[in-house]
Image (spheres, helix red, strand yellow):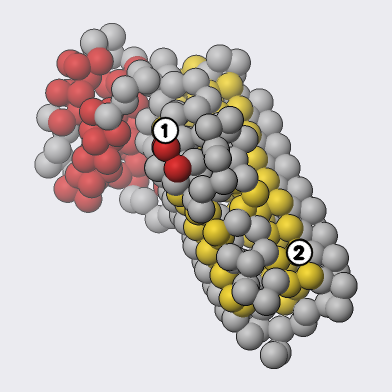
């Protein structure tokens, strides 16, 4: 095996680790864990439960990954945690398994940058390329899209959805859905403007960025009702063809906003 397995690490014989997976001092890997090639598990990390981890991830010290959910309905069922590829997971993060009665899978995508002390509860679903700052707390059943920026010490209420390229400021309390491309700040959260820096860094053209501004103004500044705003956003299709996918993304999100949206 080319991966460095420290002699103080405890790895269950039933665990399935690629040959080059490194496991640091005093870490514990449980029986039902699978870890893909190139992943580095630092010191004092516990990975347990039916947890599947992809390639090229890095776990820093004191993380607790795949532990049982903090839900009284959990009765020891073989629920799962599934983590994608190339995630950086900093110190003392806690990611829990799912709950059988409520879906059974907690899922984290790929290329996420997850800072220290982040908690991901049961049945959360995180997409790809998200930046999640220190001490963010996701309650159960939260859904996060891709390319978001979640500010430090934000608290996300159970069942809340966060759209692609959305952003929360420092210490935001989010109890309603946050649409794509929207920045929210405060306790409780309020919409403060379109989030354009992330799309700009991703290579969005000026015309596409202008359409994000227009969607935000239609939703938050035009004084229209929620249903009227959706129709007005739909009417923007075709004006900037490259932005039609963004308009579709926004409309799909708004049509499924059962908790209401941040206002």
Which residue is located at x 31 percent, y 22 percent? 258
Residue receiving disc 1: 161
Q: Quadrant of residue 74?
A: top right
112 vs 217, nearest the viewer: 112
Name the element at disc 1. strand
Disc 2/disc 1 C-alpha distance (Å): 33 Å
Name the element at disc 2. strand
107 vs 233, nearest the viewer: 107
Q: Position of residue 255 (x, y in %)?
A: 23, 28
Q: Position of residue 37 (x, y in %)?
A: 58, 79
Q: Position of residue 209 (x, y in %)?
A: 35, 41
Which residue is located at x 12 percent, y 30 percent? 235
Residue 247 drawn above or below residue 7: above
Residue 104 drawn above or below residue 1: above
Q: Residues within 10 Å of mark 2 (few under 14, many from 20)?
A: many
215 displayed left or right of 10: left
Outermost front residue: 75
Q: Quadrant of residue 188?
A: top right
Q: Residues within 10 Å of mark 1 (few under 14, many from 20)?
A: many
Q: Position of residue 166 (x, y in %)?
A: 45, 37
Residue receiving disc 2: 28
On residue 107, the disc is none
8 displayed left or right of 118: right
Outermost bottom residue: 1
Dots 2, 1 in contact, CB < 8 A: no
Residue 165 drawn above or below residue 171: below
168 displayed left or right of 249: right
8 displayed left or right of 181: right
Considering the image in quadrants, where does the C terminus appear?
top left
230 vs 57, nearest the viewer: 57
């Amino acid at each position: 095996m080319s991966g460095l397995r420290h002699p103080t690490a405890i790895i269950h014989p039933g665990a399935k680790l690629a040959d080059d997976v490194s496991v640091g001092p005093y870490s514990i890997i449980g029986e039902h864990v699978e870890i893909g090639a190139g992943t580095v598990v630092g010191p004092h990390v516990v990975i347990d439960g039916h947890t599947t981890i992809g390639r090229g991830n890095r776990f820093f010290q004191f993380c607790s990954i795949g532990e049982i959910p903090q839900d009284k309905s959990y009765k020891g069922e073989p629920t799962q945690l599934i983590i994608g590829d190339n995630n950086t997971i900093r110190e003392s993060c806690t990611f829990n398994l799912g709950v059988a009665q409520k879906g059974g899978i907690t899922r984290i995508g790929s290329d996420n940058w997850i800072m220290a002390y982040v908690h991901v509860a049961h049945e959360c679903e995180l997409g790809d390329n998200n930046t999640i700052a220190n001490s963010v707390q996701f309650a159960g059943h939260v859904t996060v899209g891709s390319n978001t920026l979640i500010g430090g010490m934000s608290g996300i209420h159970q069942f809340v959805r966060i759209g692609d390229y959305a952003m929360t400021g420092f210490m935001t309390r989010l109890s309603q859905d946050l649409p794509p491309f929207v920045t929210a700040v405060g306790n409780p959260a309020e919409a403060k403007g379109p989030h354009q820096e992330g799309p700009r860094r991703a290579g969005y053209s000026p015309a596409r960025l202008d359409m994000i501004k227009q969607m935000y103004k239609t939703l938050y500044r035009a004084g229209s009702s929620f249903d009227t705003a959706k129709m007005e956003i739909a009417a923007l299709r075709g004006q900037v063809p490259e932005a039609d996918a963004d308009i579709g993304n926004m409309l799909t999100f708004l049509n499924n906003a059962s908790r209401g949206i941040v206002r």
